[in-house]
Image: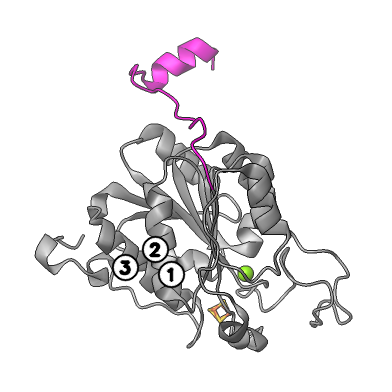
Amino acid sequence: MNEVKEETLSPKNYLSGVHPIWCPGCGHYFVLRALTQALAWLKIPNEQIGLMTGIGCSSRISAYVDAYGFHGVHGRALALGAGLKAARPDMHVIVAGGDGDGYSIGGNHFLHACRRNMDITYIVMDNEVYGMTKGQPSPTTEPDWQSKLAPEGTGIRRFNPLGIALASGASFIARGFAGDQKGVSKLIVEAIEHKGFSLVEIKSPCVTFRPEEKEWHKTMHKMNIEPTADVLEAAQKIHGNDGLDTGIFYQAELPVFQPDFTEEKSIVDFEKEFEV
Ligand code: SF4
Ligand code: MG
């Protein structure tokens, strides 16, 4: 791992040196830069970070960050993050992935991660498509988007990650835009510092399968939302906007679930207890 010297702390201290294989212009490059900038601002020692990811283009980020990481199976990154946080409450657990991984295959884990409200930061790079498998509609794709798999669109309403996170019990809910790298870095800093489950949904263009998303920089509203701890006010902000607002929509102090594993038990003890 890189040796972190405070006077030279920069995003580079958190880059593994593995060259990203994302397409040129992919929004995920900006998210990687924003995440490493946030870690540099917070001066978190590399060995105190656990970055758990699922499957998909964005989930490759665990290879690119100089931290403990695990590139898991599809949709299970939050389960990995919960396990790590349960065993190692001292670590900063960051979970990352895409809209398909987190909201479809991992949708059930998403609901219950919000409900449990463990002290985990969840970064979702939402490009409204399955990029790695060549452009199928995802849960956040608009119903009339035409693709090879759905030539006339899916006709299915979109999943609303922020609304579902609020209804499910997440205590920090934010949306950013990859093109606003500084704004995203600030959101990640706030999310990591927040005690509880923090959703940072980042609109991150897939320039290969959704080239029209290159225009998002013209339409996204940059950091125009102020946090509230009032659920109804947050719901109004989430459901009453055009989906292009960014900032912290909701932040509240809610009970945080953290199992106590201070009583040391070996696997033999567990086997005896459960008669395995
Ligand atoms: Fe990024 Fe899309 Fe290329 Fe995947 S397919 S690396 S999401 S631009
Ligand atoms: Mg995606």
Q: CA distance from mark 2 to mark 3?
A: 9 Å
Q: Report the image quarter containing ligand 1.
A: bottom right
Q: CA distance from mark 2 to mark 1?
A: 5 Å
According to the image, label 2 marks what residue? 186
For residue 106, side relative to residue 143 (left or right) = left
Residue under the image location 66 percent in, 83 percent down: 210
Q: Which residues are magenta?
A: 251-276
Q: Amino acid at mark 1?
A: Gly
Locate residue 261: give its quadrant: top left
Residue under the image location 73 percent in, 58 percent down: 239
> Which quadrant is the N terminus positioned in?
bottom left
Residue under the image location 55 percent in, 49 percent down: 228
C-beta proximity under 8 Å, tags 2 and 3: no
Q: Amino acid at mark 2?
A: Lys
Tag in front: 1 or 3: 1
Task: Give whichever of 14, 232 is nearer the camera.
Answer: 232
Residue under the image location 33 percent in, 73 percent down: 18
* Neighbourhood count class around disc 3 (C-alpha, 10 Å): few under 14, some 14–19, many 20 upward: many
Relative vertical location of residue 115 with respect to residue 59 in this rendering, above or below: above
Locate residue 204: give its quadrant: bottom right
According to the image, label 3 marks what residue? 37
Which of the labelled discs sits on residue 148, or is there none? none
Reply yes or no: does residue 272 show up in magenta: yes
C-beta proximity under 8 Å, tags 2 and 1: yes
Judge whether residue 106 can be spotted in this image: no
Q: CA distance from mark 1 to mark 3?
A: 11 Å
Q: Position of residue 37 (x, y in %)?
A: 31, 68
C-beta proximity under 8 Å, tags 1 and 3: no
According to the image, label 1 marks what residue? 183
Q: Main secondary structure of the magenta part?
A: loop
For residue 257, side relative to residue 104 (left or right) = left
